[in-house]
Amino acid sequence: MKKCAWLCLMAGLAMVTILSLGGQASAESKPIKIGVPGPMNHVGGKHIMNGVSMACDEINKAGGVNVGGQKHLIELVPVDTNEWVSVTDAATAVERAITVDKVDFLVGGWLSEAVKAEQDVAMDYKKIMISGGMDIGIGKRVKDNYSRYKYWFRAYYNSTDLADLYFVTLPMFRDLVKKELGVDKPKVAIVLDKSAWADPLVEMAPKGIESQGCEVVGLWRPSVTATDMSAELLAIKEKGANIIWAMVGGPDGVVLCKQWADYKIPAVLMGSIGEATYDTFWKSTNGTANMVTTNAVIAPVKMTDKTVPFWDKYVKTYGGFPDIYVTYFYDNVHRLKEAIENAGSLDPDRIVPELEKIVYPGAAGTYRCTGMDTSSPHDICVGVGCLLGVVIQWQDGNYKVIWPPADGSYYGIKFEGIVPAKLPPWMGKVVEKN
Amino acid sequence: MFPIILIKGAMTGAVYASLAVGFSLVFGVARIINLAHTAFFMLAAFAIYAMVMIYHWPPLAAVGVMLIGISFLAIAVYLLFLDRVRENEGAVILVTVALAIIFQETMLLLFESTFRAVDPFVRGTTQLFGVTVLRQELLIFGVTVACLIAVLLFLYKTRLGLSLRVTAQDRETANLMGINVKWVCLVSVVVAVALAAVAGAVVSPTLTVEPYMWSHPLVMMFAAVILGGLGSLKGSFIGAFILGYTEVLVVFLVPAGSFIKGPVAMLIMVIILLVRPEGLFGVAFEEERL
Amino acid sequence: MKFIRRQFRRIGREVLVIPGRAIAFIFLIALFFVPLAIRDPYVLKVLTFMNIFVIYAASWNVLGGFTGQFCMGQGAFFGLAAYTSAIMNLRLGLPVWASIPCGAVVSILAGMLIAVPSLRLRGIYFSLVSLAFPIILIGLVYVFSGVTGGEMGISGVDVLARHSIVVYFIVVTAMVLCVLAMWKLTDPTTKVFRLGVVLLAIQEDEISARCLGVNTIKYKLLAFGISAFFAGLAGGLYVHVLRIAGPSTLNLMFSFNPIIWTAFGGMGTIAGSVVGVYLLYPVMELLRFIPQLRMLIFAGIIIFVILLMPEGLVHWVRDKLEENCPRCKLINASLRRDCWACGAPLHINIKQRPEVT
């Protein structure tokens, strides 16, 4: 009988709470509510939250957002989307944030599959959404159906626009290999993990690499969630590669770097390795993955006037250093604030043209919106005078910038604190054995 | 290329074998499908991480302490949960899934989802037939083979092992013969979990340690066990190596498709089962007289 | 007119007398009136998903609870239908009411394909092998990422209707129809189909069933077909509510969910799937407040239920609410004194026996 009563209580509670879920009224929002979707249990979501919080604090300390003469503070609403596990969760979480928590804007979102679902929900309610996700398809929708999707903006660029930047350090390493190892035409192994953002590179990469005077010895495509790449690495070694050009965005990045170091594969490891841009990288690989090179979003050099102060402040507040999630979303909160102030109102239809026009200098570069003439509008431009990023190399546990090169040969850009690139310590030894 | 495939396949197979043999043992003796088997593997890896990296204990001591701890955990799990639902196969599956989730979530709470790395017990690499092998991998191979031999000796040379084999053959008769089936099942669970834990401990330096690491080995282990024939230790052993070699072959023969090494292994399993439904070494007509 | 009056009398006689059926009847009718009380689109969305998952869980029940084929890869049917429906809708331009049945039909074909090896495999082997199918499908999804969108999935699929209330009604109607259909198909006491009895017989002892001349192969194939069809229907509806078809429908947990819901609610009875989803899914939604402990509590609930009520909630409740009449064997409410059909006393109190002199 006790069991029965307990179960009846549980069932009744469940029913009552379903019905009461609807009746939650929230207080009239004088503060501007920004929903922050992201996988909060995951380091990506936490970093998004960090970046947005830091920006929000700065704005609130200065009095808030000035909307047509009246100042409003910003209130953040974290929205745990659980996107790694379930896209349904992501979509319902965002819908809940809009209808129950009554958020005015959405800044966040990360996994492209989930972002697409969240985008549809946000557009239904005509809420301005500044999201992550690098798939070009998300932006294409703005072009195909402007009136519905115009409220969406990307916080950064799409992966196709970024492609050219992946090849910029190849000449540097090609020359280094030529000099140190005496190889005339360095052999390059291409590693692209099996994800949509890397797919266009299957065609582009071999052409780009060969045009730089190198020889392509093979193309490997591990799974994003691969836990063991030793077979791939040994095959790469067997082909005699001198350089590994890797585009790995997921957890396979840590596996790749760690096993590359464990097996002492005699090839330079460079490319765009997402995991290598995090402050936890050195610890995750136990300090073995020396001389890993990757494109990165930010470094403590004077990319813009705001970069170094932002970097220092983040390190002081949160301990680790900022990465792509922190930086871009931090900048975009400020960008949104300025657009709102320019529009002088909270009406999304009036803010959209402002976001399209605005040129915002942030901590990672200057944010310019791509126009309707490009294949993916409402993205951020890539290149000199826009978002450029840097290329870093982990040298003995230190996060060092090696590109743009110190001699200013790239469009005259010169930062202080650039160091030359180095080869991994075991490469020289292998040559000696020969 | 051939030596690399031979050696890499052997290494991968050895790890899967230590998981598959344990799982098969538990199923054969106790008829329990323990979906949390690889979750113990994950727990062992985290335990080693904590003891070696955070508290800086020597690896040997860490492995010893971890084994004792995990054995107690296995006993507790068996007595509290598995023993009560042993008869109902569906319930066992659900309980073990829930346990695996609980282990995963606990590790998430304690360690978060950032990847952890464990220092190798033996550092450096050597050359084996011209192939670069990690010294740790040699250790893995050696330890797993030694453990498997130990289990075989236990099963065939001791009285307790004899009672396990008898229970696997026919539970009712074993009961009639005076064997305490409940305790025999407990022993099988503990032995299997210990095997998985040792595997987890020695493998941890070569993998990224994170709370979700148990799902891929789980699927591969199932495939190995089914391929070899449920309840047949020899079958599970061989099935594990077949799958290990399949994985390595896919990477070498189809480098642009190395992301499908998992599904390909599954496909092979399904195909072999179409031809021989009881697995390679399973017994064809095994009447369930439970 | 007479037909309608006959139906009402039938309801009065067959449904309302039996407490279990009465509760189910009232519940299903109430579902239609929910939008009167609740207008919040978020809650309606959650309820819509719950109804879709009810069809999904019930489809698993047909295989697992009735036929004893514990399929751990039900997500393969769901995901396949979802992708098919999305591709038909987006690339071939089929309207929603055509793409969903297409998805379900493809799902049936897949069901037949999966049924073939299962006919030769014994119970546990089949369960473990069924895990392989979603994984193989994921492999296919990634290999043909041009068509399937790879890990991005296919997005921009048409929605069932513009208004979330209309979507809710469509899905609730679908759910009620599917559940009633599955119930009628698998109910052992029905005189319309023999299917239910045979499936239970196959579950209990297949060899004896075959000895009795039952063509178990045909019935197993039927069970697979029905299960795959309804799972496919759920998949098609899902895609047109979420507007995205992605590989998340093919992952391990997604295939385990219907098993967990049904085991919680009650295997071997369609009502079990309904109850399981309706109780567990809101709990998971509510637990969003404590995201770190969410899965942990969920797993804890599963263990709690399995240990206390291994047969499921519905069986346990029904045992308390209903009893069979000792004379005519029809189901009666436990609280009644006499059977509603034959009038025999339901509970015989031994103490009331007349004294024998």
Image (spheres, coloured by chain):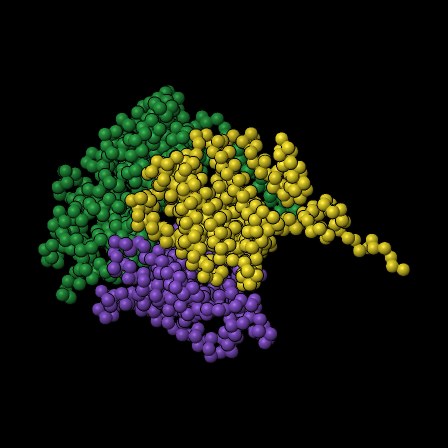
Q: Quadrant of residue B40?
A: bottom left
Viewer-side residue, A212 vs C334 = C334
Q: In the rendered view, does A166 fall on the left or right side of B42?
A: left
Q: Which chain is yellow?
A: C
Image height check: is A91 above or below C190?
above
Viewer-side residue, B121 vs B85 = B85
Give x and y (percent) for residue A109. Answer: 36, 39
Look at chain A in the picture and name its colour: green
Residue found at x 49% / y 31% = C165
- The reply to whether residue C149 is visible in this rendering is yes
- The reply to whether residue A309 is visible in this rendering is no
Give x and y (percent) for residue B243. Answer: 35, 63
Q: Which quarter of the image is occupied by the C terminus of chain A?
A: bottom left
Q: Which chain is purple?
A: B
Image height check: is A97 above or below B7?
above
Q: Quadrant of residue B24?
A: bottom left
Residue found at x 55% / y 38% = A18
